[in-house]
Image (spheres, rainbow, N blue to C red):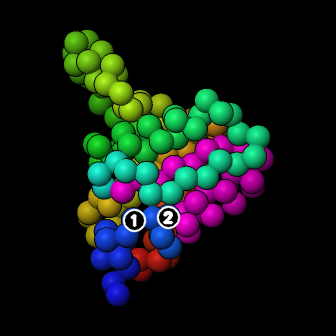
Amino acid sequence: MNPVTYIQALPAASASQAMLAAAVRRAEQLGVRVNIAVVDGGGNLAGFIRMPGSFLSSIEMAIDKAYTAASFGMSTRGFGDLLETASRPVRDGMLRRPRLSEVPGGAPIMVDDQMLGAIGVSGASDEQDEDIATAALTALEGLTA
């Protein structure tokens, strides 16, 4: 079965597990403890891991980052940058919506120019969360090549 078809049909299984494992490895290399969420293209939770000792408050943040990245097909940093250029009513309105986050650490899962889902990482610095998400996306590239 084509990996892309498999990921689209079953967004959690091997793809999510590989991404979560890569994210945990990178977090351990950085010496941080985070929560990591993978969602499918509809923003539904497809995989999640909480590293022991990670902040409880960042559980939902990781999920929200992934949801935001899947909703807009862009990183949460990119979403935040986009909101910077929006009018105040648009910005305020978007940020009042449940589950949307402009906090860096969320990134879309892109395969062959198709957005298949997203990953969200929360619990470390913005840069570390993004670094960990990138490591997870890099692991996915090996599965779909």
Tell me if residue 84 can be seen. no
First in sequence, mark 1 or 2: give its number.
Answer: 1
- What secondary structure is marked by label 2? helix
Q: In the image, what residue occupies the spot 72% across and 44% down?
A: 33
Q: Reply above or below: 3 against 12.
A: below
The image quadrant of residue 110 is bottom left
Residue 64: where, in percent of width, then height?
44, 37
Q: Residue at x 37, y 50 (%)?
A: 44
Task: Decide if residue 107 is on the left or right side of residue 126.
Answer: left
Residue 30: in magenta span = yes
Mark 2 Cα within 10 Å, few/some/many (few <14, many 20+)? many
Which residue is labeled 2 in the image? 16
| Residue at (52% x, 40% y) in the render | 62
Whether residue 53 is in magenta: the answer is: no
Do the residues under discs 1 and 2 have CB atoms within 8 angstroms? Answer: yes
Disc 1: which residue: 11
**Is residue 87 depicted above or below 42 in this figure?**
above
Crowding at dot 1, Cα within 10 Å, few <14 / some 14-19 / many 20+, comes out as many
Residue 83 in sight from this viewpoint: yes
Q: Amino acid at mark 1?
A: Pro
Which three-letter amino acid code belongs to the residue tagged 2? Ser
Instruction: Please give the range of residues in magenta.
Output: 17-40
The image quadrant of residue 84 is: top left
Image quadrant in which the C terminus is located: bottom left
Q: Which mark is residue 124?
A: none
In percent of width and height, residue 60 lies at 52, 35
